[in-house]
Amino acid sequence: MDTAAHPAGNGASGTTLISHLLDSLAKRSNYLEEGVIHTNVDSSVSKGDSLADLVTLLSSITLAVKTVGSMVRRMGLPQAEAQSVADINKIANDTWIRELTASDACCVLVSEDLDDPVVMEERHRGNYAVVFDPLTGLADPPAQDMGAIFGVFRQLTQETEPGVEDVLQPARNLIAAGYAVYGAATMVVLSYGSGVHGFTLDPTLSEFILTHENMQVPYSGRVYAINEGFSSKLSPKTQQMLKALKDEPALDGSTRTCRYIGSMVPELHRTIIRGGVYIYPAHEARPQGRLKLLYEAGPLAFVVEKAGGQASTGTRAILDIQPESLHHRVEVYMGSEDDINLCTSHFRKAPWGRGPSADPMYSLRRSKSIDAQMKAGTEEADSGGPLVHSPSIGAGGEDGFVCAYLPVV
């Protein structure tokens, strides 16, 4: 595609989402050799894919986000389209389906609000299968932030009618995924396989402007997000994990704090920006977990990993799980690598045992310095006493040596 025909959009208003997509995807789908532009069939936008269709599809998603975001802000007003949670949820779902159908880029749609997939009529059919949750965080609107989640797969059934098999793919097969946040501002965070970028809606221009380029999840954070109301229903291992989060310092030595608002998308958005861990574990009432793999956990895990974080069920990477049904549920641990390693060490057994405290290198990983720890160990050994780890040793201090929990395999 000739990108010269598409202005970069880098004026006073900043880079728009569409211009950013056109520039970035064109660079990935073409390469320059001896002054000639060639199609790169090894790129994620490869043979059988249409760059124009993918950009049109993502543009349709942003239009749905604008429409729903406007309704969220007006909800409850006398002339608003939606006067209740049921109203706005249905309108949001209908809006997403309408815009995606109009894009002529999709073959099948799967929504959190529908039991069965929507197969596109042949005249509206494209090469992409889209999964989405049109509106999340509906517990207490409009007093809290809400959001939406989406993921885009390539069509698998090129020679047959599209269907459910086109979306029953591991999230690692996604070619694009992202989420929207509806709050004081409307924002879209998107990854199409190369980095994660955030775009904020400028209401005066009705355009999404690039405001967060190449977002990265901090290696460690101070905040964990979990509904502790279910603490008594958690498994013993999960309760031990939760206790470790409370007792053990973060990598910078600070005490962790809990933040939970009951709305997954803004919760995870904060985790991506500030670090930490978002947790939705299995419990007695939900032994398989609560979050849906296909259109909640999977696309969000894709974004988190592309931003340098980790996403796990506690025992395996979310991106590698094969969905067994449209509404397959999983438990979720997403966020900073150091915090995820601490959490998952309670569920995966290493040669030295389960849990971080069983690791013989554990004492060093939260110490001020190797020399100080070695000296403390020698003094304990000379006195005949045990070497006991104290959580208070976790501060980085002037000595500066702090090391993370190593991944437990």
Image (cartoon, rainbow, N blue to C red):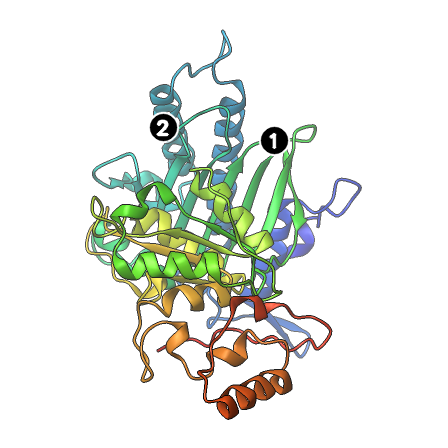
Of tags 1 and 2, the one toward the viewer is: 1
SS for callout 1: loop
Residue 85's quadrant in the figure? top left
Image quarter hosting the C terminus: bottom left
Crowding at mark 1 (Cα within 10 Å: few <14, some 14-19, many 20+): few
Q: Which mark is residue 94?
A: 2
Towards the viewer: 375 or 320? 375
Residue 279 x/y as whole percent: 40, 52
Residue 95 x/y as whole percent: 41, 29
Residue 312 x/y as whole percent: 37, 62
Position of 164 with respect to 376 (left or right) is left
| Residue type, mark 1 in image | Ala
SS for callout 2: helix
Q: Residue at x 61, y 64 (%)?
A: 253
Give the residue pinned by disc 1.
184
Crowding at mark 2 (Cα within 10 Å: few <14, some 14-19, many 20+): some
| Residue type, mark 2 in image | Asp
